[in-house]
Amino acid sequence: MIGKEIRIERIIDRNTRRSVIVPMDHGFSLGQIDGLLDMTHVISEVSEGGANAIILHKGLVKRGHRRSGRDIGLIIHLSGSTSLNPDPNDKVLVCTVEEAIALGADGISIHVNLGAPHESKMLEAAGHVVKDCNRWGVPLLIMIYPRGKGIDPVSQQSVGHCVRVAEELGADMIKTNYTGDPVTFAKIVRACSVPVFIAGGEKAGDLETLTAIRDSVQVGGAGVCVGRNAFQREDPRGFVQALRRVVHEGMEPSLALGKSVTR
């Protein structure tokens, strides 16, 4: 596993054992969305803001990830679906581990939706990716969510089930929903042997987002995988800097934003 250990140091800070990861794979599913129209610029902004790693689809690696500025970890996403599909939760593999390695990936990510109609195919595909990641010594981030009819996407039971499935599949890192409650989230991360990151979700207020992240890391979370809540900000670089202060320094959200907020 020495290859995984070397590569994961480019994704997770060796001192804090936490990470700020910014996924930028949303264009595949949503099209030309705000924040991801000038990929070269936004990659530079989050890099200079201090993100530990970014997540891209294979075709966008050429948009300037390592040509200038601060160098950060690169995770290549293997899963895809579009919002034009009647079932956008049906994720299929659109890249291979070998392709990602050839592009310089430090890590791989895949997406699994538990409870979705095509859950079995996503689990089967994940099993093959885990095998290839172990073969090549590349760390795997499994993005896994409870998404199905009648399923509570933030309950301790459903989120905990997702985390357990990802761990049993062989994930090296897991991204999932935050339960919204540090007590229930603490029980989930304590029962897991690999780092668990919370998803950022749709764009929300600065303080609201940072407070949820603060609460999650205080009870054992490994940090955050935040996309739209970072790259759709008016100042993505400044907001990523605030994320770093909360995740790596344990700073209070209002101080991390550089302003006083009365609750």
Image (cartoon, rainbow, N blue to C red):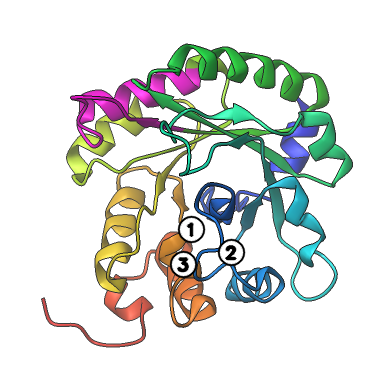
Image quadrant for the N terminus? top right
Disc 3/disc 2 C-alpha distance (Å)? 10 Å
Q: Is residue 67 left or right of residue 172?
A: right
- In the rendered view, tell whether residue 135 sits above or below residue 225: above
Q: Which mark is residue 227?
A: 1
The image quadrant that residue 176 belongs to is top left
Instruction: Mark 3 or mark 2: name the one nearer the start of the chain.
Output: 2
Identify the residue shown where x is 49% and y is 70%.
Answer: 34
Give how far across and how far down residue 21 sits, in percent: 55, 54
Give how far across and how far down residue 2 sits, in percent: 79, 30
Disc 3/disc 1 C-alpha distance (Å)? 5 Å
- In the rendered view, tell whether residue 168 sits above or below residue 248: above
Identify the residue shown where x is 68% and y is 74%.
Answer: 44
Give how far across and how far down residue 221 sits, in percent: 39, 44
Q: In the rendered structure, which segment of residues is drawn in magenta?
A: 144-167
* Residues marked 3 and 2 touching at CB (< 8 Å): yes
- In the rendered view, tell whether residue 244 sits above or below residue 195: below
Q: Is residue 78 left or right of residue 34?
A: right
Residue count near mark 1 (Cα–Cα under 10 Å), binned few <14, some 14–19, many ≥20: many
Callout 1, which amino acid?
Gly
Q: Which mark is residue 230?
A: 3
Identify the residue shown where x is 36% and y is 80%.
Answer: 257
Callout 2, which amino acid?
Ala
Identify residue for label 2: 51
* Residues marked 3 and 1 touching at CB (< 8 Å): yes
Callout 3, which amino acid?
Ala
Q: Residue furthest left?
A: 263
